[in-house]
Amino acid sequence: MIYFDNGATSFPKPYTVVNAVEKSFSAFCANPGRGGYASAMKASEIIYNARNTVAKFFNTETENVVFTPGCTFSLNSAIKGVAKPNSHFVISDLEHNSVVRPLEKMKNSGVCDYSVAEVSYNETETVNNFVNKFRDNTIAVVCTLSSNVFGIMPPIEKIANEAHKHGIIFILDAAQGAGYLPVDVEKQHIDILCCAGHKGLLGPMGTGILICSPDINLDSLTEGGTGSNSENLNQPVYLPDKLESGTPNVHGIAGLSAGIKFIEKTRSENILNHENKIIKFIFDEFKYDKNITLYTNIYGSVPLAPVLSFNVKKKHSEEVATLLAEKGICVRGGLHCAPLAHKKMGTLRSGTVRITPSWFVGEKETDFLVNCVKKIAK
C-alpha cells in the first residue's frame, strides 16, 4: 500500500506511537484521577505529562490544554461554548463542515448568525474581507490554519489581531497543518485552538485537542464526572476539568503524546520541507499535462501547505481515486467535507483528487503515483 491520504488520517504511525498505545493497555489500564492505586496513579501521570507535552509544543500553559475525542468535538465545544443569543460569527470560505454545520444548525434555530469572508491571494485584501464582515454583535472569528482541500493558508495572525482590536474571539481550526506548520498560541494571538490528534500530530484516531485562553469563559458542551469536586453537583469552573467530563482516552492520549515527541525529535520544519519537496515534484510533473487540472500554484506569492488537489479531464474525482486504489495507491476523491472550499474553486460538482504526503513516503512511492496518474490521464 502506498499512502497519500494523510489529510484524512496519518499513516503509518511512528513505532513510538504504537509502542506507547500498546504499553498503555498492559502497564496502566486504569481510570486516571479515580483511584489511589499504582496503575491509576500511573494513568494520571501519563495524562499530566501529555498535557505538558502539548502545552510546550503550542506555547501555552498546561492547565489550558483540554483533551477531546477529536477536532470536530473541539470545534463544536469552541463554537457552541462562546455563542450567545443573537450573536454573530465570521468564518472563511475555506472552512470544513466541522465549522459550518454547527453554525448552520444554530442559525436555523435562531440562536446566532454567521458571515463568510473570502480568502484571496492578497493578505491585505483577505484581512479586509474579514473586517468588513464584522458587526457590533460579532462574537468570534473561526478560521482554518490551512485548507484541507487546496492547502491555502489564510494570514491567521493578522486576522486574529484585527479580531482582537474589535473585541472578537479568534478560534483557529488547525486540524490540517498542526504538526508540520508553525502554531504558537501566544505569538499568533489564538484564543481557542482546535486540533486533530490523528493527522499531522501522528497520534491515534479518537484524539483531539482544545486549548482555551483562561480569559475566555467557554461554556461546557458536556457535563459529568471529572474526578474532582465530586461533592458539588455543578460542573467545575476551572480548566481543564470544566471541559473534560468522563473517562479520558488514556490509550489515545499516550499515543498522541508520543506522536508529538516524534515530531519534536524529527523537527516540524524538516517534515514540512520533506512534504513540500514531494508536492513540488508532483506539481512539476502534472503542470504540463493537458489532461490534468491543477487548482493552486505552489510557486505563487502566497504560501501553501503541502496539499495538492487535481482532476483528470472527463473523469470524476472519485473514479480517479478508485483507479489509483486498484494500483494500491491511497488518495481521496470527492468533496473532503469542505463544500465551501469547492464552491470557491468551482469544483463542487466534480470534487477533487487530493494528495497529502507524509514524512514516511519517498521518491519511489511518489514516482509510482505520478506514473499511474499520467496513465489514467491518457
Image (tube, rainbow, N blue to C red):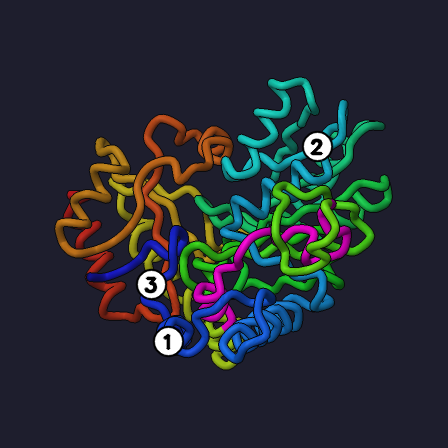
Is residue 199 visible in the rendered structure shown here? yes
Q: Is residue 4 magenta?
A: no
> At x 66% / y 57%, what residue is drawn?
211
Identify which amino acid the numbered label 2 is placed on.
Phe
Q: In what element is the residue under mark 2? A: strand
Label 1: which residue? 26
Label 3: which residue? 11
Across the whole image, how many numbered discs are drawn on residues?
3
Task: Using the rendered view, name the quadrant where residue 44 is placed.
Answer: bottom right
**Mark nearer the N terminus (3 vs 1):** 3
| Magenta residue span | 234-257
Q: CA distance from mark 2 to mark 3?
A: 35 Å
Label 2: which residue? 89
Horizontal relation, residue 346 to residue 101: left or right = left
Q: Is residue 240 magenta?
A: yes
Is 359 above or below relative to 110? Answer: below
